[in-house]
Image: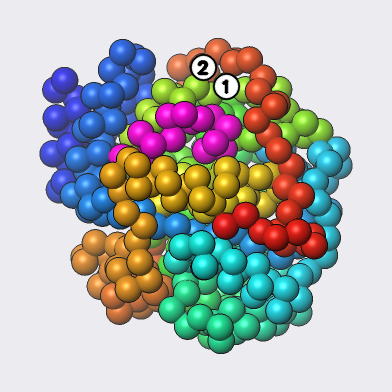
Amino acid sequence: MDLLNTLVDKGLRRELPTREEALAVLATSDDDVLDVVAAAGKVRRHWFGRRVKLNYLVNLKSGLCPEDCSYCSQRLGSKADILKYTWLKPDQASEAAAAGLAGGAKRVCLVASGRGPTDRDVDRVSDTIRAIKDRNESVEVCACLGLLSDGQAERLREAGADAYNHNLNTSEGTYADITTTHTYADRVDTVEKAHAAGLSACSGLIAGMGESDEDLVDVVFSLRALDPDSVPVNFLIPFEGTPLAKEWNLTPQRCLRILAMVRFVCPDVEVRIAGGREVHLRTMQPLALHLANSIFLGDYLTSEGQAGKADLEMIADAGFEVEGADQVTLPEHRAAAEAGCGSHEGGGVCGSVAAQPVQEARTDLVAVRRRGAGTDLAPNA
Ligand code: SF4
């Protein structure tokens, strides 16, 4: 297919595809999905070999958020029956992080619900980062605490944070449809603050919220313009008790096309399969490793993932290898670009088409997290 040959050539040169080319990837048929995966897989292997980076989520503070992000089980008014707890103590968070690192994770992602941290919250998280790094100095720590005020990114950097995550989630044009308590511009501002402070920027999207192909291309092109080092691709987990509970719009093939499009637009960036991997890709997960070079190990913030051991077996069976702490994630030209994260040698940062028909709801695949951080049960890692 000429389209795919063109996109492979551009991906190897880090050249931005046209919007039409990105849209055309999303419009390919299920019959062509293996060709799409094979083409984007060439770009993935060129920049990242067969390495898979493992990341581990620690939910520092769960539920009770005052914001109204409609996709989120922790939102204001959520009826989802999730774990709710306030800030973990540094030693509790460090214990949870250690389980993930022992399971093979290279990066720990410290996440807290809320609009954004107070200065006292930044102190707490700083103590937590130090506690984690005292136990394992090679770990990469990413903080995800919501909208940042002036100076907070710098303080997190000083405390040892390597990266900061704040997702754009969806296109600027539809942002107000999914959240009313903050704006798309607020989100962009926080990613820019993280970047400016020398933190590796991590920013991604959520697919499956009823958006059009144009919306998906818009948000991925916006991400490329922001130039994060890592782009998490979430597939909506339609939690019962949230406004998007009925949005079962994704098929495994659609997820693969979305990941391929992200890889073509952001060829040399860490593309991470995030929430919804097991729910929407299901038995097609191994194919997605040919597109993304990074996944989360074990459980998510409020839902359970497959067993950490199954993640490791899947990576080995598919012919990939877990990236070690001593291996550099990003290609040399990106790793050398700026100071920052342990991912990088020397530091660094990082329409009109209708949505797919609604699929049958698979609520049986959504398991609320009942183990790990905030419970007395062992974490999944
Ligand atoms: S700010 Fe974060 S925790 Fe709060 S509702 Fe939005 S996504 Fe959920």
Residue 252: x and y in percent read 46, 25
Provide the residue designation for mark 1. Answer: 249
Which of the labelled discs sits on residue 356, or is there none?
2
Q: Left of 175 or right of it: where is 140?
A: left
Residue positioned 47% across, 83% down in the render: 137
Q: Amino acid at mark 2?
A: Gln
Query: Splitting the image into 4 quarters, where does residue 95 fall?
Result: bottom right
Kindly check if marks 2 and 1 are in contact, taking CB atoms under 8 A apart as contact. Answer: yes
* Up-down relation of residue 200 to residue 248 (above or below): below
Q: Nearer the viewer, residue 131 or 67?
A: 131
Q: CA distance from mark 2 to mark 1?
A: 6 Å
Q: Amino acid at mark 1?
A: Asn
Packing grade of label 1 (10 A; few <14, some 14-19, many >=20) is many
Residue positioned 47% across, 29% down in the render: 283
Q: Nearer the viewer, residue 82 or 232?
A: 82
Which of the labelled discs sits on residue 114, or is there none?
none
Q: Left of 63 or right of it: where is 2?
A: left
Q: Is residue 40 visible?
A: yes
Query: Splitting the image into 4 quarters, where does residue 145 fall?
Result: bottom right
User: Helix or strand or loop: what does disc 1 sit on?
Assistant: loop
Magenta residues, as a range? 276-290
User: Helix or strand or loop: what does disc 2 sit on?
Assistant: loop
Residue positioned 35% across, 42% down in the render: 317
Residue 289 magenta-drawn? Answer: yes
